Structure formats: structure tokens, C-alpha cells
Image: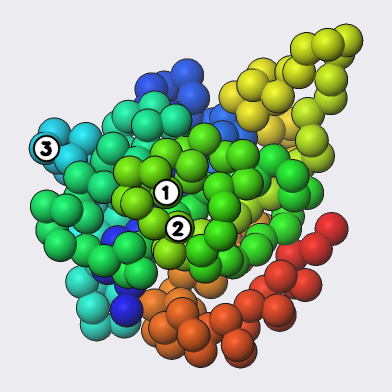
Amino acid sequence: MVKLIVGLGNPGEKYNNSRHNLGFVTLDHLLQKLTKAKNTFWNEEKKVKALTHEIEINGEKIVLMKPTTFMNESGRAVAAFAAYYKVSPEDIIIIHDELDMPLGKIRIRFGGSGGGHNGVLDIIERLGTDKFLRIRIGIGKEARRVGPHSDTSDYVLGTFETHEKGKVTSVVKQAIKDILLLQKHGIDLYMSKYNKKSDSTNSS
């Protein structure tokens, strides 16, 4: 069963509502749902460079984590926590934004490459394995290119447009539903029973 759920994002107020911080947003909403609290409270664990909150899901204690490193060093926090608390990579879920998927789409995947996501790539490198679960949440179309330069960074660090916010709310709710199902049934049963349904439900 899952013991650590990590949402990826960048620390600091200026990044709070950015597309790249959708992992943080999902964890905040998950915590609000489970605690029925309007405001979430996180404990700073400097030894693992993260904000954490221990919570019970389906009778099992789970740690939610938001790294306090920047995105491209997310692996420092995840690997430090896994080593200190002896958490196997197979017991970790990583929630992150996915540039190459449309907003409203979720894909659940175990293992594989980082797909160009710097946070996931750093986690793979520092854990020394790609054998962990990812919940990939689409953040729209690929950023447009202007001349020889890419505006990908501006796009992912930008905030959602007003007309996108309804989809953001819906996809975060679906991600939370998937997390709870994963924790209840385990990865293997979830992947065989629910994953295709979840994927098609969130197509756009």
C-alpha cells in the first residue's frame, strides 16, 4: 500500500496558482477533503526539505509531502524522506503536471521515463529507479514557440485562464478520487479495474 504521496511544485507565493504547481494544489484539496478543514496545515521537516502532513486514508497512515526545493530538485526531498523513513519507491505516488496532455486529462502510470518533466527526472535520478507511480495531470496544450525560442517556461509558470478554472476544479477532484481508489485497492487492482475508465472520463 502507498505510504508517501508527493505533489510537485515550486515553493513561494508567486508560484501558488501556476500550472506547474498543480501537484501542490491537488494535495491541498486532498487534505481539505480528508480533514474537512478550510485551511490546510503543513509541518516543515527541514531534514528532508519538505512540508509534510500525516493523515489516515482507509485506515492506514499516509504522509502527504510538498518539497520545499524548487521543481528541478524535487528528488532531494523525496529521496531524503524515503531513506530516512525507509519508504520503498513502490510505495510512493508522485502527482505532477503534464505539458503534453490537454487540461482535464489524467493518466496513471507506474514506472517509465520522466517524459521531460524535470521534477520527475530528478526523482528518478536520486531514487536510482523509475519504479514508482505517477499521477499525470494535463495542463493544456504544448506551449507555443516564438522564433528559435520556446516560451514553455512562461507557460508552465503562468496561471490558468479564467475559462480553464472549471476544468482545473474537475480534474483535481478526479485526481483525488483516483488517489483514494489507489489507496483502497492497491496499484495492481486499480490499474486493471479503474485506470482505463479514469483515463477516458477525463479526455477532452
**Marked residue nearer the N-terminal end (3 or 2):** 3
Q: Which mark is residue 47?
A: 3
Tell me the residue at 74%/65% (across/down).
202
**Residue 31 x, y percent position in the rendering:** 35, 57
Q: Which mark is residue 130?
A: 2
Camera sees residue 85:
yes
Tell me the residue at 67%/19% (across/down).
154
**Residue 18 x, y percent position in the rendering:** 57, 30
Please tell me how crowded label 3 is: few (under 14), some (14-19), or many (20+) other residues with Cα within 10 Å.
Answer: few
Q: Tell me the kind of residue under disc 1.
A: Ile
Tell me the residue at 30%/55% (across/down).
64
Instruction: Provide the secondary structure element on which disc 1 rests.
Output: helix
Tell me the residue at 48%/45% (across/down).
120
Identify the image's colour scheme: rainbow, by chain, secondary structure or one colour.
rainbow
**Residue 204 x, y percent position in the rendering:** 84, 58
Do the numbered discs 1 and 2 sit on residues whose CB atoms are within 8 Å?
A: yes
Cα distance, mark 3 to mark 1?
Answer: 20 Å
Cα distance, mark 1 to mark 2?
Answer: 5 Å
Residue 100's image quarter?
top right
**Residue 93 x, y percent position in the rendering:** 41, 62
Instruction: Provide the secondary structure element on which disc 3 rests.
Output: helix
Q: Which residue position holds label 1? A: 124
Q: Tell me the kind of residue under disc 2.
A: Asp
Question: Which of the two discs, 3 and 2, sits closer to the camera?
Answer: 2
- The N terminus is located in which quarter? bottom left
Q: Tell me the kind of residue under disc 3.
A: Lys
Residue 25 drawn above or below residue 31: above
